[in-house]
Structures are given as structure tokens and as C-alpha cells.
Amino acid sequence: MNSSARRFALLFLLLLIAASASAQSARESLKQLVATPGVSGYEGVKGGPAEVIQDAIKSLQPAPAVTVDSMGDILVKIEGSNPGLKRVIVAPMDEPGYVVTEITADGFLRLQRLPQQSPQFLFDALHFAQQVSVLARDGRRVPGVIAGLSVHLQPGRRDAPKMDHLDEMYVDIGAANEAEARKAGVDVLDPVTVDRRLYQLSNRLDAGTAVGDRYGAAALLALAELLKDRKFTGSVTLAFVTQEWLGGRGLRRVLEETNAEEMIYVGRLTAPRTPGSGAPPPPPGSGVLIATSDASKPLEGFAAEIQSMAHEIGVNAHAEPAGALRFVGYLQPPKLPEKFVQLALPLDWPVTPIETVSENDLGGLVSLLDRTIRPPSGVPGGSGGGVTDGHFARAPHTELSVEEVLKELSVAYGASGHEAAVREKVLSLLPSWAKPETDASGNLILHFGESASGHTEGAKTAPPIVVVAHLDEIGYEVKAIGDDGRLQVAELGGGYAQYYIGHPALVHSANGTHDAVMELPAGWDTAQFTWPNYRGNTLARVDLGVRNREGVEALGIKVGDWITIEKQYHALAGTRANARSFDDRVGCTALVAATWALGPSIPGRDVTFIWSTEEEVGLKGAAAAAERLAAAGRTPQTVFAIDTFVSSDSPLENPRFAHALLGQGFVVRAVDNSNIVPRALSDRVVAIARQHNIPVQYGATGGGNDGSVFTRFGTVDVALGWPLRYSHSPAEVVDTRDVRGLADIVEALAKEW
């Protein structure tokens, strides 16, 4: 190899190293910025993107000059070693979201969208039944959920809400009235955003809410790190602008105050491409996009210079049609510098919770921005880091409060047929004396009242009873792996598609959990779109970032693996809490708590607790348990099925039906779609509850319960539950007082029924 070739190879290697380090630095900033909500007009709230950006700039040594103008724009001026060109590089820091406009008498928050015109057709629809945060004036993030319909209560209902409009949108922070909401720190004009994190897919793809609104700011922060050596001529002002979604108000102010000779705007294209409008938009991984009004013609002027610089350093940059930057207001649009160009990155699923960008593209963007200021130079530093899974260890067999047990159980993952992790969690929460068995169906069975010889203790034994709660939650299962690397998945249990499709997901396999996204169906970005019915043979698609079948198999993912969406436990206002899969982790919690209260022996009683499997797909675990007990001659006289009372205690439901109120006690589920409790037995449960001062309600709701599969053998099903809002959604809400009452009544029934 000659000396010229060696120099070229060395330069190319240095560029690759620099690009990799730039990508890592930018991704770390993107990770932090995506997790930081910043609704248009509220970018400067405590803990918002403005604070994150300023803290990052202040950490540079030497720290450059920072000013914040009257619009809240952050201007970071970095002077080079010699006088020269005045450059400005701009990126937005806001995102679309909501602001509180009313607190109702019963404690719900009403909203208005910012921007007031919807950014895309499904923007509101994808927020229903999701976890959100209200950004209070004192800096607190008040947890809440946006109300959603409970699928069990809709059959036969007339004129139900469609969950696609602001008029149907309510935020539930757990408050029972306006005073409680205000006590939690919430007020009118507080911004509201969906909870989020950055999901790392395969092939260096990143997905999450507001990714398209944050990659520009992340690139500028990585660029500031590179420029701190000041080995360039002229000056560079990095401008992080506000209210871009509200018509470019921050950018207009920056144009007035910087008097730039050269400006690069880094952010999403102003005229997003839509299916059917011509060539499909370039996918993530395609490189840097250079906005042009006519992609059929070669780039000219400053845009052509930028493209030439990109090719020089090995970054793929190509023209992409886009409209001019949008300025809204009563004034004429401001004049842009003569040397102006807009750079963007390709996005999948724009302005959705699964907006996806390529880390390679982001690194290339940083390298290109650096190149526009100076020739290629040394290797920048980068910082590593990984995403933790948020799990925590706890010594087994330690008694916890009901709330602590509920929290631990609700964040364990276990879709129908895949309950092993939940079963192990229950085992770790039981007292050490409890020695439950796991049967062939995966049910966990704990029997009270038998001695080691198998004979029932005590001279007289009450008729046998069973108390059952199910371990599983709704989810999806992999049915096929496409040649394009997409997983084709079917529902495990029923729910509204919009609560899951179009959101980040977790793929659970034998070798771990993988970040992914649930793809939206074709036509999602058109006004004519309707949600498909995913029951039966209709399969949803999941994207891991892999583009072929072999790549999926290399990850260890196979047919039969399962998918959920991520979940967290949030303590809400007062005694309320939110997490996905309270159905039926509340029932499981009640059985765990009752086990501790009862102790290893209940003289004169024959009681069996069952934590069952596959309830959501047809009560399969309970049915198998009922058959085994019958075959062994141990059919119980009564079964208490502990499961959700799907409540209409919600602003979206009709109170005519299922109107058990949160915080008013456990519920005798007297009527559902699978069973009717004999009225005398309902009254008997109520009498026992009142004798022990346990708050109780009773009523009729939808859905079925595990106890109904015991009735064919002569068992009477007495179903019990607790009021749950927004069933089968990420927004499920309970009152923990009802959970404690449920545990208390299970203990009382085990001793006295």
C-alpha cells in the first residue's frame, strides 16, 4: 500500500471512530431528552428540556456563553480561535402535548391540545388509556392516566365514545374531587404529557415519543462537546428554540436577534410525506436528509455545499422534498439568511409513540454539522451507558404491606400461557411455611387444613371451599416470523387495539426481553382510518429493528414467544394507584395477604387457594384445576373467584350498569356474563363483611370469572372483586383501600364460610 493510500485509510478509520463516538454521545443526550417532556410553550418548566440543555452546556469546560431570550430560546455562543463567519445552527426543543383547562367537580382534568390543531390523525386516539404526567408548577410530576373505555362494558351499549377526540378526554390522577386534585398540586394551565423512555431496537434504531422533536437538540449537544476545543474560525451559535409546533415563534425571535450569515435548521421536515403521495419516505438508516422544494433537480448553493461535505466524510446525505419552514402569525414570514439549509433525519411512524430514528443517521448528522464548521479532525470523546430494566431484588418470604405486594406483583410480566415469572413472584411473597404445588397447567395451589398424613385436622370439618385468582395478563404471542424480520402476533386476551398498537413493546424470549414497537396498520395516517379487529385470524406486526428472518432468530426469538407493553406502578392522589394488569394481580395480592393472616393451619376448615393460569384466554387453568379436584373426589362446595369488578365509575362509561365506586369497598360480583350468585349467598357475604367492618358493595358487570368452570361439578360460584377503572388497559386504576378490604374478606371467608 502506498503512502497516499495509507493516509486515506487512516483518515477513513478516524472518521469511523469519530462518527461512532458522536453517535453514542448524541444518543445519550437523545435518551435524556426523550424522557424529558416539553409541551410547546412550556419548554422551560422545572425539569423540562430547557433545564436539561442548560445543565449539559454548563458541564462543558470551558463553558460557553449562554443566554435565554424573551421566548425562552437558549442561545449558546461558541467563539472560534480567529474571527470569521457568524453561523447559527438551530434545533427545536418542544413537542405536541396537552394543557389542563378545567378541573371537574369529581376531580378529573379536562384538556386542550397544543398545538390546537392535531399534528396527525391518530394523535389523540393513541393517548387514550395511557399513563401520563401532569407537570405541576412546583416541579412535581403528578402521575395520572387518560381515561379509556373498559371493553367488558361495551357490548350492547348505544352511542359509546369513540376515544378519538378531545371532548372525550379526561385525566384521572386518583382525586375524588376538585379539592383533592388541587391538593395534589395540579392546576389549570399545567402541561400534560404521556410517560415515555427511549426504546433501543436492533440495528441501532431508537424509538419513542417525541424522538423526532429531540434528535436535533441531541445532535447540537453532541456538537457542542466537539466544538469546546474552539479549533475553528468565526463563531457558532447553537440555538435551541421554543414553540416550533406553534408556528415557529421561537425561531422567529432568533432570526431577529442573531443576524446570522449562515444558518442550518435541524429538525423534522415541515411537510411530512404520506403513503400514496408518490415515492415512499426514506426509512431510518438512509442517512441525512437535505430539504429541497424539488428533489428532481440537483441541489444548488449552500445545500449543494452541505451535500459535498457529507460525501467528503463518508456520510450519506440526499435531497428530500419538503415545504418551507412554517411560520404562523399575523406578520409576514421572517427572512431567512441567504445561506440557509434544513437538515433532517428519516423517521418511521412520525408523531406517534413509536417514532423511530437511526442512531447511525444521528451520528452522521453530528459529523456533518461538525464538518460544516471545520475540516475533519481528531477523535471526539464519547460516553457509554445502558438502559437498566428497573427490576429490584427483595429478600423472599418477608411480609409486606398489601400495597407493597400489589406493586411487586403488578410489575411482573406474564401473558396468558407465560405466567412463570408471576408465579415465582407469588412464591417469593408467601411465608416460608407455605408449600404450594404447581400442577400440570401451571396453577399454583396452596391447601390449608391437611396434616402430613393427608387427613383433615379437627373433629369437624366445614365444607371445602376454593378461592381462585388468576396470574395472567393480556398480551400477544408470536405466530410467525416474516422474511422482513417482522413478527406476526395474535392477541392473548381481549382489549382495544389503540391501547397497544402504535406503542412501544417488549418481546419476551428465553434469552431475555427485547425492545420493539407495535406497528400501526396501513392507512393509519389518513382521515379514513378505522382500527381493525385483531380477533381471530387478523395478526398485528411487531418490529424489532431487524430486517430479515435470520436476524430475528439470531436474537433467540421464536414462534411461541410473547409480547407485552411496558408497565410501571404509580401511586396516585389519595389512596389510588395505577398499573397495567391490576386485573388480576389485585386478586393475587388478596390471596397472598390472606395467607399471611391465616397462618399454616385453619382448624376445622378445608380451604384451597389457587393462583390460576390462562384466565384471559378461556379460564383454562381454573378449568383444569376444577377437573382434577373433581377426579380426586375433592370438589369444593363453594368457589370464591377473586377477579375485577369492571366498574363504570368513569367519565366515559354509562352509570346505569356496573356502577361500583372506587374507595367504597370490595364488590360482590353478583351478576356477570358467566355466572349469577344466588342472592342469599350475596347477602351472606355482605353480612360477614359488615360483621368485620369491611366496606362492601355488590352489583352487575361484564366479563366472566374463573369460578364459573367449577359449577358443572356442583360447586356454587360466589364471585368477588374490587372496582377497577379502564379495564384491560395501561390506565387501570384501583383504590388501595378496596384491595385491603378484599384481602380482609378472603381471610374472613376462609375462617367462617
Image (cartoon, rainbow, N blue to C red):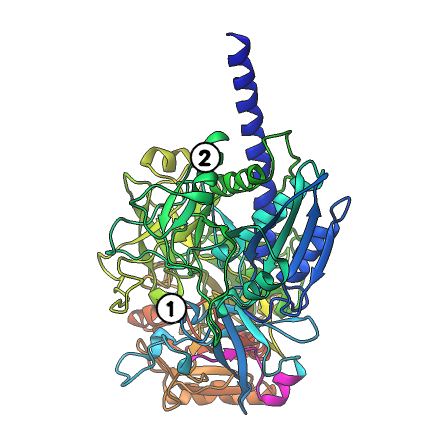
Query: Where does residue 302 sit, x and y in percent of width and height?
Result: 47, 44
Which residue carries the number 1 mark? 706
Looking at the rendered structure, the kind of residue marked 2 is: Ser
Left or right: residue 726 compared with residue 277: right
Query: Where does residue 297 sit, x and y in percent of width and height?
Result: 31, 44
Query: Where does residue 747 sit, x and y in percent of width and height?
Result: 57, 74
**Answer yes or no: do the residues labelled 1 and 2 have beta carbons within 8 Å?**
no
- In primary-sequence order, the first of circles 1 and 2 is 2
Which residue carries the number 2 mark? 308
- Magenta region: which residues? 169-182
Q: Residue furthest right?
A: 62
Query: Where does residue 177 sit, x and y in percent of width and height?
Result: 58, 89
Q: Residue furthest top?
A: 1
How many C-alpha atoms fall within 10 Å of the one at disc 2: few (<14), some, or many (≥20)?
Answer: some
Front position among marks 1 and 2: 2
Left or right: residue 536 compared with residue 451: left
Left or right: residue 333 compared with residue 107: left
